Every structure is written in C-alpha cells, then in structure tokens.
C-alpha cells in the first residue's frame, strides 16, 4: 500500500456538526474495507469522534452493528449526550432559538462558563459550531460581528435540515454508545474486543492547536504511535496530515495518501495519509 493513492467519493453528510478535517467523505472507502475484510457486523469505534460523520453513515446504511463515539472534549460529549438523551428538548430549543449575533453572544458565554449544565453546554456547542466560520468554536460568527460579510450568521443553520438529522440519529440511540476519555485510554480498554473496526483520526500534527480545543502536542502523538505500533493486530485505520514528523513515527507501517476537501476559511484540498494495522486488507 506504500505510496498508493485512495480515491474518495463525495458522500451525503448526516452529522449535525461541522468539523475541521471531518472524515465523513471517507465513508465509501470504509464500505469497501468492511466488505474486503468480512467485518460487516462489527462494532465501529471512533476514539476522536468530533462530528462522527463516518460513524453515522456506516450505521445508517447498516454497514456496522453499532458505533462507539468518543471525544475527550466535554463540549462535544455534551452535544452527543444532549441529542441522544434529551432529543425532544434539544429540538424544541433549536426551533425556538433565534440565530442572531445577540444570541451568539449569549451562547458563547454559556459555552465559556465552566458551570454550565451538560444540556446548555451541548446546545451552545451546536449553536457556535453552526454559526462560526468553518465550524471552529473559537472563531467569530459567519458574516462578522457587524454582519457585513457576504454570508450571514444563519448561512449554515438550516433548522429544518438540522432537526431532521438529529431526529434520525435519535432513532438509532440504542446502537450508539458515547464517552469522553482520552482516545489512547479508550483504545487500551477496547482493543481486545472481538469484531471491531477502530478508525483513529487524532488532532492534526500541524495547526492542531488552531483547530481543536483538546489538541495533541508532540509527546501525545508519540504516545499514540507507541501504542499503535505495539498493537498492530487489532483492526484499525489511522489518518493524519501528511507530514514527515508523522511518517517518521510509523516507519514500518503501510501507508497511502488521499485528498479530502475541507473548509477552514476557504475551500481547500488537503493531502492526508492513511496508515493501517497489519491484519487490515486495503481494497
């Protein structure tokens, strides 16, 4: 697989969250991996879930039996818990909340307040994710504070569409588990489970601190590589930004490159790298 390129096809998005570097577009590739490796009834696990776009696609299209979505970011965890455990309340809140700069300011204060309830934090995370530039929580609203930009704050907040996504996710609540621990700690707990496929999409090595609240420093990336290199026999796939620092951490692992469109201020095409465990066959 070294130096090969993977072709990524456009896929419908099911997640209510916009996520920098989100990998929902990999779903069609994952379909083929699951078929090639005869693991169609597996539990699919994302230790760094974020928007969990690929996980939801695999679940909705009945490619996997259930999914485990994990994110150490309390705000992302709060969002998933809120839509799965308080679906009606969350939908009512979405319907009633005006999408304005004034509301953006209120939701930002809720998000920043460490004493906010799980539900309030979950909704604030959702609101800011849908109204901020590129979905980055710490960014400013689409259109700017004075709303003088080409696009306005509600450009990515189609209530009807978002509510439909949330309702669909809630229908699968019994087949979705969620947690908020460090991704490496999660893998230490689950890597001996039978019939699993683990998709590992850690924070980018480059610019990770500008995109994610819980970014990884070099030591974290090294710790992850040590764990995966010493556990090559459970079914895992790993994606990263394609940089020498990461390639050097996995010298004996097979690799392939791929391109994904993502939006961080402007639409770009990002070359990334895929690394796999020993027992996964790439179609």
Image: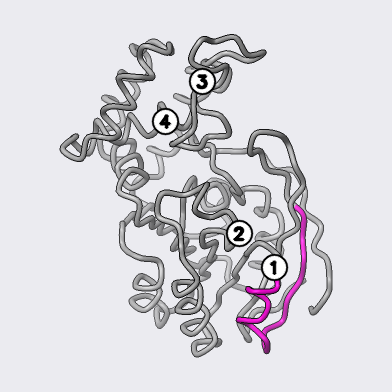
53 relative position to 245: left or right: left
Residue pointed to by mark 1: 243
**Number of marks in the rendered image:** 4
Query: Upstream in the sequence, badge 3 or badge 2?
Result: 3
Residue 144, horizontal then vertical, whole percent: 54, 18
206 relative position to 52: left or right: right
Dot 4: element = helix
Dot 3: element = loop
Q: Which residues are magenta?
A: 244-259
On screen, residue 249 above or below 39: below
Residue 255 on the magenta segment: yes
Query: Upstream in the sequence, badge 1 or badge 4?
Result: 4
Q: Are marks 3 and 1 in contact (CB under 8 Å)?
A: no
Q: CA distance from mark 4 to mark 2?
A: 35 Å
Q: Residues within 10 Å of mark 1 (few under 14, many from 20)?
A: some
Residue pointed to by mark 2: 206
Q: Residue at x 69, y 68 (%)?
A: 243
Dot 2: element = loop
Q: Are marks 3 and 2 in contact (CB under 8 Å)?
A: no
Residue pointed to by mark 3: 157
Q: Are marks 2 and 1 in contact (CB under 8 Å)?
A: yes
* Colouring style: one colour
Foreground mark, 3 or 4? 3
Q: Residue at x 35, y 51 (%)?
A: 73
Q: CA distance from mark 3 to mark 4?
A: 16 Å
Query: Upstream in the sequence, badge 4 or badge 2?
Result: 4
Residue 142, horizontal then vertical, whole percent: 55, 21
Query: Upstream in the sequence, badge 2 or badge 1?
Result: 2
């Amino acid at each position: 697989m070294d130096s090969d390129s993977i072709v990524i096809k456009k896929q419908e998005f099911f997640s209510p969250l916009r996520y920098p570097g989100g990998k929902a577009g990999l779903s069609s590739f994952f379909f083929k991996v699951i078929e090639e490796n005869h693991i169609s009834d597996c539990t699919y696990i994302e230790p760094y879930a974020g928007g969990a776009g690929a996980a939801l696609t695999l679940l909705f299209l009945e490619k996997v039996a259930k999914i485990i979505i994990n994110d150490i970011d309390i705000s992302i965890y709060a969002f998933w818990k809120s839509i799965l455990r308080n679906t009606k309340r969350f939908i009512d809140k979405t319907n009633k909340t005006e999408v304005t700069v004034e509301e953006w300011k209120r939701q930002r204060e809720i998000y920043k307040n460490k004493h906010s309830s799980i539900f309030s934090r979950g909704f604030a995370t959702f609101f800011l994710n849908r109204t901020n530039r590129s979905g980055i929580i710490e960014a400013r609203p689409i259109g700017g504070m004075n709303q003088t930009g080409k696009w306005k704050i509600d450009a990515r907040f189609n209530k009807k569409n978002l509510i439909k996504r949330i309702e669909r996710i809630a229908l699968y609540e019994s087949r979705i588990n969620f947690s908020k621990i460090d991704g490496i700690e999660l893998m230490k707990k689950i890597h001996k489970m039978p019939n699993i496929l683990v998709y590992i999409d850690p924070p980018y090595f480059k610019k990770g601190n500008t995109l994610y609240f819980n970014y990884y420093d070099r030591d974290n990336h090294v710790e992850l590589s040590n764990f995966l290199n010493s556990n090559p026999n459970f079914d895992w796939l790993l994606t990263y930004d394609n940089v020498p620092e990461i390639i050097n951490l996995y010298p004996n692992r097979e690799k392939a490159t791929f391109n994904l469109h993502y939006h961080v201020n402007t639409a770009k095409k990002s070359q990334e790298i895929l690394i796999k465990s020993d027992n996964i066959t790439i179609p």
